[in-house]
Image (tube, helix red, strand yellow):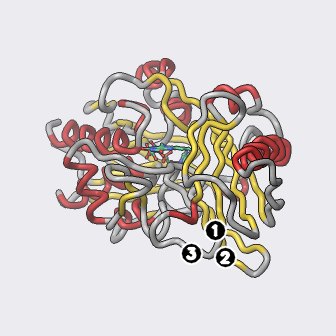
Amino acid sequence: MPPKDIAIVGAGLAGLACAKTLAAYDVRVRLFDKGRGPGGRMATRRVEAEGHVLNFDHGAQYLTAHGAPFAAVLDAARAQEWPDAGRMVGVPRMSSVPRALAEGLDIDLVRHVTAITGAPRAWYLHHLDARLVRPDRPLPTQKPEVEGPFDAVLLAVPAPQAQALLQDPAPHLAGVLQAVRFEPCWSLMLAFPERLNLPDTLRLDNGPIGWAARDSSKPGRDASLELWVVQGGPEWSREHLELTPQQAGDRLLEAFLQLAALQGQGTPPPPPFFSAAHRWRHALVEAPLGAPCLWDATLGLGAAGDWCIGARAEAAVDSAAALVDAIRSA
Ligand SMILES: Cc1cc2nc3c(=O)[nH]c(=O)nc-3n(C[C@H](O)[C@H](O)[C@H](O)COP(=O)(O)OP(=O)(O)OC[C@H]3O[C@@H](n4cnc5c(N)ncnc54)[C@H](O)[C@@H]3O)c2cc1C
């Protein structure tokens, strides 16, 4: 019999899409995410600087729907075209898309899941306050909270994190995930006091910058602000992955100001009044799993995410749909 009481780790697009569809089939679903809001890599960073509220889409830049399921997600979230026909963004922020999907779902936020214990049909999740967990440091020694039992646990987290969580309860599933690889990405958020002489989007093949976009040119944004998101190219981001955010941000800013000066016929652009860099260790899928999802019906353990299929947000939703189909046919 298909499971009726399911925990999902990860409230990005894949986890949310799984939860939404399962809930429609009357399955009890609880989501756990370490973030302060749902959405994962479809993220928007909100900051206050110089009396302004600044929102930056510092993860996914634009979305394309090739199939009906993702088109329906974009439609329901009232996403709009940018920068041209066929490419879409969340309005007024990229995070509006996952937030629309999250409506009505039971999500525990700021919970970092550290382990899955138990046995088939009776799994327990161990989780800590995510504010205590520092990336690249050993887990803190606080006693985790334990939730369960759940009939099934689904992992909708990037493959390396799914691999770590599956290692004890399902080493055969963890092993399969070893082949999946991601490109990293340094993402720099900039606010300028005046408009730069640049087009709204730039894609570059050489040098540190891979992509730059005038975030404030997207529909529903405050067009009186001059906000930019500048992303390091995959090679540059990989080579400079272990810089501090300050160091990586300074280097990307220098390259971006040079670019803006060149386009402005040598006139140097003004310095930004806000600048912050974010490191995405697992940004875009480089080598996918090559299967739409993972599901072991005997154990009641599964996984979904963009990394099953490919390097686009749509892949996360398609993977979630494949996982729900697999669960329901169990
Ligand atoms: C810089 C960047 C640019 C991109 N540009 C584009 C683009 O232009 N177009 C496009 O289509 N796609 C783009 N993408 C990719 C797109 O964002 C992803 O394909 C999509 O968001 C993946 O969704 P997901 O649900 O599979 O994973 P995620 O969004 O990564 O969701 C995983 C969730 O799991 C949570 N989590 C992880 N570990 C744990 C744990 N132990 N406990 C609790 N929670 C946990 C995370 O907090 C996160 O919310 C970009 C991504 C990045 C980072």
Q: How many marks?
A: 3
Residue at screen point 47% across, 19% down: 175
Locate the C terminus and report the quarter of the image it occupies. top left
Mark toward the start of the polypeptide (3 vs 2)? 2
Q: Is residue 110 or residue 241 the one in the foreground?
A: 241
Mark toward the viewer: 2 or 1: 2
Residue at screen point 36% across, 63% down: 80
Are circles 3 and 2 on residues that touch, CB within 8 Å?
Answer: no
| Residue 140 shows in this picture | no
Q: Residues within 10 Å of mark 2 (few under 14, many from 20)?
A: few
Mark 1 vs ligand 1: CB below 8 Å? no
Q: In this rendering, would 280 be left or right of 169?
A: right
Residue 222 image label: 3
From mark 2 to mark 1, how far is it between C-alphas? Answer: 7 Å
User: Mark 2 = which residue?
Assistant: 53
Mark toward the viewer: 3 or 1: 3
> Is disc 3 placed on a helix, strand or loop?
loop
**Quadrant in which residue 272 is drawn:** bottom right
Mark toward the start of the polypeptide (2 vs 1)? 1
User: Mark 1 = which residue?
Assistant: 46
Q: Residues within 10 Å of mark 1 (few under 14, many from 20)?
A: few
Residue placed furthest toward the front: 265
Are circles 3 and 1 on residues that touch, CB within 8 Å?
Answer: no
Mark 3 vs ligand 1: CB below 8 Å? no
Residue at screen point 27% across, 30% down: 298
| Residue 3 shows in this picture | yes
- Kind of residue at disc 1: Arg
**Relative to 134, is 48 above or below?**
below
**Relative to 57, is 236 above or below?**
above
Q: In this rendering, would 110 be left or right of 7?
A: right
- Kind of residue at disc 3: Asp
